[in-house]
Image (tube, grey):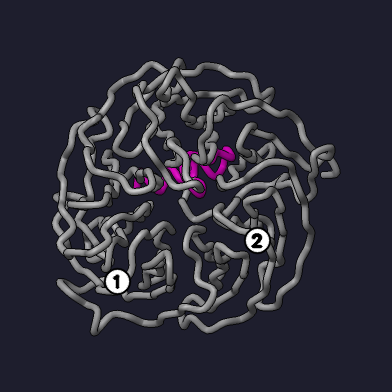
Amino acid sequence: MLYSLLLLFFCFFGDWPQFRGPSSDAIVRMDNVPVEWSDSTNIVWRAPIAGLGWSSPVVVDGTIYLTSAVPKGSGLSLAAMALDSTTGKTIWQREVRAIDSVPSIHAKNSHASPTPIVRDGSVFVHFGTLGTASLSCSDGKIQWLCTELIYPPMHGSGGSPVLHEGRLAIVCDGSKDPFVVALDADTGKIVWKTLRAVPASISHSFVTPTITRVDGRNLVLAPGPQHFAAYDLADGSEVFRVMAPGWSVVPQPIVYEDLVIYNHDYDNPELMAVRLGGKGDVTGTHVVWRRERSAPSTPTPVLVDGLLYTVSDKGIATCLDAKTGEQQWMERLGGNYSASPVYADGRILFLSEDGVATWVRASKQYEVVRINEITGRTFATPAFDGTGMYLRTDTELLKIVDRNR
């Protein structure tokens, strides 16, 4: 009940407190969403951001929070920062942790890719195995720092934590001994740590989990190497699993009615829909549909009114019936995609890695509403509040509004 009230509060006041918004569903429930922009149109301010980070901005009570990895000598300063949403001015910037050398990562990754979470006056930031912290929203003071999530990352870290009932659930799938963990949000202490139960020849992934309630229990839905597993948030015990080949999973699972829809592979991506519930291995009984064609490897789909909108990393947009997996349309947008699509005011926003943003009508018929372009690399999913949109490039954070409304 408290969680539902918090979501209503965030929606009413136009906050965007975590990856993919207040309900973590990439649906913008506010007015004044800009439709048109360019380097010279509808830009309120540009704020240079030191270093590099592909974490999405989050916005609460008129303050934007984000992370970055800033060069420092031969190493990096893992930093969190807060900006004023009206002016773009920095309110505070805090070094969470300094590291002496720069770990190797994938060319598409950064050392600050997980998105922060804001709740109850604290901002939670995560840098994978390099550290997780809680900071005060007001001044950036570090309230706790956890450096106990030790695992050998492959290509860096990417998945964001999720917060529910005082626990941060985090997937830590490295190159060996992958695990899922829950931290106490008040102290940063490990509440439980569960090793993945399925041996895999390639064990790394970058998934952001989803938490949902099934049969009276809060479950952490966490695709991983060669399987999908659901864990009890209370104690970390595995409740059920689905077997499927695959590795390097990125997209966040989506819950639709009694289904969970998720990706299980990067090189040969496939979407799967599985009926929630059951115990143990439910591969033979609970898989509802599967789809390989033009499935996404990185962007998380968005679900609107029973329709699932996806974009593949190579720019193929698709609309599917979420219940059956039946294709409604499939079109080539062009470009490469890492940011997750977002729904706002009857339209789906697809943002390519090179700053091209395509608005498509949310419908069973394909219709392009508008195409916008901005300078810079754009891998991060945009954020929104009641006053505009916040778009991160490789060098700046931009606030975009629709001055015609």
| Amino acid type, mark 1 | Leu
Q: Is residue 147 above or below residue 73?
A: below
Query: Tag on residue 374?
Result: none
Residue 386 in view of the camera: yes
In percent of width and height, residue 151 lies at: 23, 42
| Cα–Cα gap, marks 1 and 2 | 27 Å
Query: Tag on residue 276?
Result: 1
In percent of width and height, residue 146 lies at: 25, 29
Query: Tag on residue 348?
Result: 2
Graded by Cα atoms within 10 Å as few (under 14), some (14 to 19) or many (20 or more), the crowding at tag 1 reads many
Q: What residue sits 36% from the left and 59% below the top?
A: 248
Q: Nearer the viewer, residue 361 or 194?
A: 194
In percent of width and height, residue 359 lies at: 72, 59
Q: Is residue 111 above or below residue 297?
A: above
Q: Nearer the viewer, residue 153 or 30?
A: 153
Graded by Cα atoms within 10 Å as few (under 14), some (14 to 19) or many (20 or more), the crowding at tag 2 reads many
| Amino acid type, mark 2 | Ile
Q: Is residue 310 above or below residue 188?
A: below
Residue numbers of the magenta segment: 1-21
Q: Secondary structure at mark 2?
A: strand
Q: What residue sits 26% from the left and 41% below the top?
A: 167
- Where the C terminus falls, by quadrant? top right
Q: Is residue 190 above or below residue 222?
A: above
Whether residue 266 sits left or right of residue 366 in the image: it is left
Mark found first going from the N terminus, 1 or 2:
1
Residue 304 in view of the camera: no
Q: Nearer the viewer, residue 269 or 55?
A: 269
Magenta stretch contains residue 4: yes
Magenta stretch contains residue 193: no
